[in-house]
Image (spheres, helix red, strand yellow):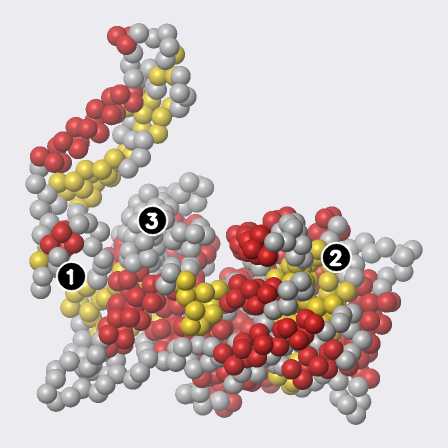
Amino acid sequence: MEASDHAALAAALGSDADAVVLDFDDTFAPTPTNVAAAYGALPGALASPGAWLARPRALYARQPGLTFGGIPARAALCDLAALLTALPGRWPHLYLPKLETVAQAQAWALALRTAEAHLGLGPGTLRVCLQIETWPGLLAADRLLFELRDWAYGLNAGRWDYVFSVVKTVGPTWAGPLPPRSGLGMDVDAMRAYAEALVAVCRARGAQAVGGTAALSPDPHDPGPALAAVQADKAREAAQGFVGAWAGRPDLIGAVRAGLALGAPASSPVTPSPVTPARLLALPDPGPLDPAEVEDTAALALAVFRAWFAGQGVVERAGRLEDTATAELARALLGQWVRVQAPLQDGRPLTPGAYLALRRRLCPDLSPEARLLDHLVLSPTPPAYFPHEAQVLGLCGPGLRAPEAPLTAPHPDHPSPVADLGPLARRALAACAELARFTETPGEITRTFLCPQSREVTAYFSAWAHDLGLNVRLDAAGNLRARREGPAPESPTLYLGSHVDTVPNAGAYDGVLGVTLAYAVAEALRAAPLPFALELLAFSEEEGVRFGVPFIGSRALVGTLDEVLGRQDAQGISVRGALEAYGLTPAELPEAEVRGPSVGFLELHIEQGPVLQAAGAPLGVVTAIAGQNRLRLDFAGQAAHAGTTPMAHRRDALAAAARFVVAAEELARATPGLVATVGMLSAHPGAINVIPGRRTPPWTFAMNRTPRARRP
């Protein structure tokens, strides 16, 4: 039951359900009013007899208006606190939604352990069921269960969230169109494999397998067909090994219970085929799509978005209960179909233009649901979750911040196109804080070239660019490029931007601030006529962390990336291979090169040294840049026993390398404008009682003219 719907909760309490689930996730629209109503209803609900469960929001969601140390609070932890403190001595079992990674499971383990300690509860007092409703979560289900073993009692199947995750994850690399929702029922072998994989983990670990939600809405004049379909679905789940399931409405409880009671005959154990990744992804070819079904898919997403913005989490539509999960699936399918230009049964391809024409028949351009759906469908890569994207877009949705106040129109007496840049500057800084969440390593900021989190960064800036009306593309090197055309085809281009990758454990502003400020500049100039084209660049790589060679992103713009395509990372993956694995096409690199006249390139960047700070200057102009030479030097000596080899007989490679390090330091200090850094030393054989026979110090030797920073 949606947690703030008091009438639905009352109906659930009056039913004969074995337990009632308070839902803060898929069926919940988190407006401030709804959150307050849901939290306020908890003491009374938990005081009622019967078993209570609760599903907090997913870890990606933020709680508007609440921060810790300047970082937005996680809504999931707010829900957890409310649930565990609403009625002392009464703690509902928890469903943990949308788990994807081991790190997320570890975060929940820490939260549960901390909560038990704070409440004075013994370890393992709180009980949880893990929702295996994402493609990465299914692949890691056994490990997720292990990480939460002290609290977990089962795994739950969430079919539509799972299908959404599959479409979002594998759709960008799928050659043709994926099937519509009607072609992804549990009778499809790939979906049976999903259920079998979940049950297999439960059987191996002694956990309970909980089936999906019955989400049909029976016709009050003829409920028989819907109830029969629910019963058949639950009988199938019971035959596969599921021991329980959810009913989306009280009038479905009887059909759910009857289906589970049928199950598989005890004398006929189920012997499914082995579950392999190939079987899980053996989705049927839908052939040309029915235009009516495509239109209905768009209409479903728009209907749920419209209701969600109005504070309603569930929509009854065509005999089904539709919520966040089915809307996410609908928009992901639309995006995948548009990306592959899926053929329609009337002979037309579903191009971006055809999609927009369809959507405009259903909903006007300026409505928030249309703006959200267009962004989700037309983004270069599938955005993660629509509630987050609505917040990024600044739409007035549930619990989301309102858009920035409109920029003041130019005044004849003031040449500046805006009156106050403060809001945009604050937005640029806030964007950096948001982007800091997209990290490979929890607790720090680390984003290497083409890591999975790069897609989230791309989606973030794509949303901003679409909101500004810019043309967006992802080039063959993974650079996101957002462009505003000039007054004439031959107009020169001003390039603004920086890089979005980081060094390990980076600061929040290195590189990415230059991108957020570039977007803020474009927003400030949105209504101003410009004599040139404007292109915003979010370079995919600059730091050189993954492949040991920097500037992969910008090399593509000057046509030199092909020189390093064979370079390999620590796992033996080449730059070319990494691009292809990410869904990019190295053969298209020439299309990334800058052509035509340019005004120049401007990069706004934090100072990474102490010069401006020492001078008390807030802003400087770079007059020189370090020209780097990176060398890897091997010092060869002779390994020997440290205790028995006299000093006069030693050939210690590390001692020689140490003298070189000191000499490089002294040379740099004595030479104006020269800097020298040894960033790493490795020893062989690397034992404390063995004289090193070989030392390999990769080091960076950077030369430039004496750098000066001055205020403009």
Tag 1 residue: 618
Local secondary structure at mark 2: strand
Amino acid identity at mark 1:
Pro
Using the rendered image of the protein, determine whether residue 559 is visible from the camera's viewpoint.
Answer: yes
Local secondary structure at mark 1: loop
Using the rendered image of the protein, determine whether residue 109 is visible from the camera's viewpoint.
Answer: no
Amino acid identity at mark 2:
Gln
Q: Tag 3 or tag 1, which sits nearer the N-term?
A: 3
Local secondary structure at mark 3: loop
Packing grade of label 2 (10 A; few <14, some 14-19, many >=20) is: many
Q: Tag 2 or tag 1, which sits nearer the N-term?
A: 2
Residue 78, image x, y percentages: 52, 66
Please name the residue shown 64% across and 73% down the image.
43
- Mark 1 against mark 3, which lies toward the viewer? 1
**Residues at marks 1 and 2, CA–CA distance in whole angstroms:** 60 Å
Amino acid identity at mark 3:
Val
Residue 318, image x, y percentages: 67, 86
Q: Which numbered tag is attached to residue 503?
A: 3
Which quadrant would residue 538 be assigned to in this image? Answer: bottom left
For the residues bearing labels 1 and 3, Cβ distance under 8 angstroms: no
Quadrant where the C terminus sits is bottom left
Tag 2 residue: 208
Instruction: Classify 410 as above or below 560.
Output: below
Please name the residue shown 59% across and 72% down the image.
24
**Residues at marks 2 and 3, CA–CA distance in whole angstroms:** 43 Å
Residue 610, image x, y percentages: 17, 50
